[in-house]
């Protein structure tokens, strides 16, 4: 198993990460590609990559012994999601102080082995290095494992939306 961060990922790694995320989004949420929701995946490995250090982002990629991606997770500035930042502006008046945890996925047969925790710990360390004050996480009620995982890692639920995804918003101070 190999763990890479955005600092040592190449173009092939970014492409594999994007493909892996799309696959898991379909498997977990039954959502097909949507350019409005998946712009971050389209930008992976490019100048506008929100998961790279110049954009105050970070990414963790786990590659299995067979060379395939088996897990990943990203960190990005909440300001890179302007509509979301605006909708949460009462809670986060400065969206640049908030690092959002995104795209955390673990291949089915590797779940329960601690990979999610490793990815979360590395992203939290990156958030501290990037001087974020708060970590933000959202998940769908359709994915109770993600909600449970957030709660067990110190995140507190502060809002539930009545949207189609039944989005749950959580955060924790750094």
Image (cartoon, grey):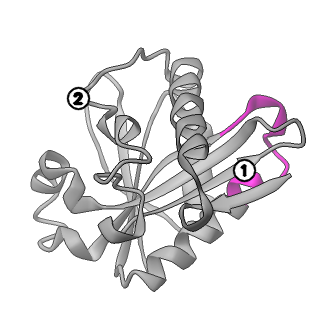
Of the pair 138 and 105, the residue shown nearer to us: 105
Q: Which segment did they paint magenta?
A: 106-117
Magenta stretch contains residue 73: no
Name the residue tied to disc 2.
36
Q: In the drawing, what numbered circle is on residue 75? A: none
**Mark 2 crowd level (few <14, some 14–19, many ≥20, 10 Å Cα):** few
Tell me: 95 left or right of 77: left
> Which corner quadrant of the image does residue 119 belong to?
bottom right
Cα separation, mark 1 vs mark 2, equals 26 Å
Q: Residues within 10 Å of mark 1 (few under 14, many from 20)?
A: many
Residue 76 at x, y percent in the picture: 36, 60
Place residue 131 in its image quadrant. Answer: bottom left
- Placement of 119 over or under 68, stated as above or below: below
Camera-side residue: 63 or 45? 45
Work out which quarter of the rendered image holds the C terminus and state it. Answer: bottom left
Residue pointed to by mark 1? 62
Callout 1 secondary element: strand
The residue drawn where x is 44% and y is 48% is: 45
Does residue 35 lie above or below 139 as drawn?
A: above
Residue 148 coordinates in the image, percent (x, y) = 60, 49
> Is residue 153 in view?
no
Residue sitting at 35 percent across and 52 percent down? 49
Question: Considering depth in this image, is 118 or 50 the residue closer to the camera?
Answer: 50
* Residue occupying the point 42% across, 44% down: 44
Per the image, is 113 magenta? Answer: yes
Rendering coords of residue 103 (x, y %): 49, 44
Q: Secondary structure at mark 2?
A: loop
């Amino acid at each position: 198993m190999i763990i890479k961060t955005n600092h040592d990922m190449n173009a092939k790694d970014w492409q594999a990460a994007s493909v892996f995320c799309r696959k898991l989004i379909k498997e977990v949420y039954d959502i097909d590609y949507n350019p409005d929701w998946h712009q971050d995946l389209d930008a992976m490995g490019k100048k506008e990559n929100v998961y790279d250090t110049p954009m105050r982002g970070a990414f963790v990629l786990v590659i299995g012994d067979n060379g395939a991606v088996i897990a990943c997770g990203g960190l990005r500035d909440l300001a890179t999601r302007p509509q979301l930042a605006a909708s949460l502006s009462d809670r986060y008046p400065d969206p640049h102080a908030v690092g959002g945890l995104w795209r955390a996925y673990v291949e089915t047969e590797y779940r329960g082995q601690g990979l999610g925790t490793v990815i979360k710990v590395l992203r939290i360390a990156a958030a501290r290095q990037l001087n974020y004050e708060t970590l933000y996480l959202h998940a769908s009620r359709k994915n109770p494992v993600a909600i449970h995982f957030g709660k067990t890692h110190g995140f507190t639920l502060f809002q539930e939306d009545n949207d189609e995804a039944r989005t749950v918003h959580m955060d924790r101070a750094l």
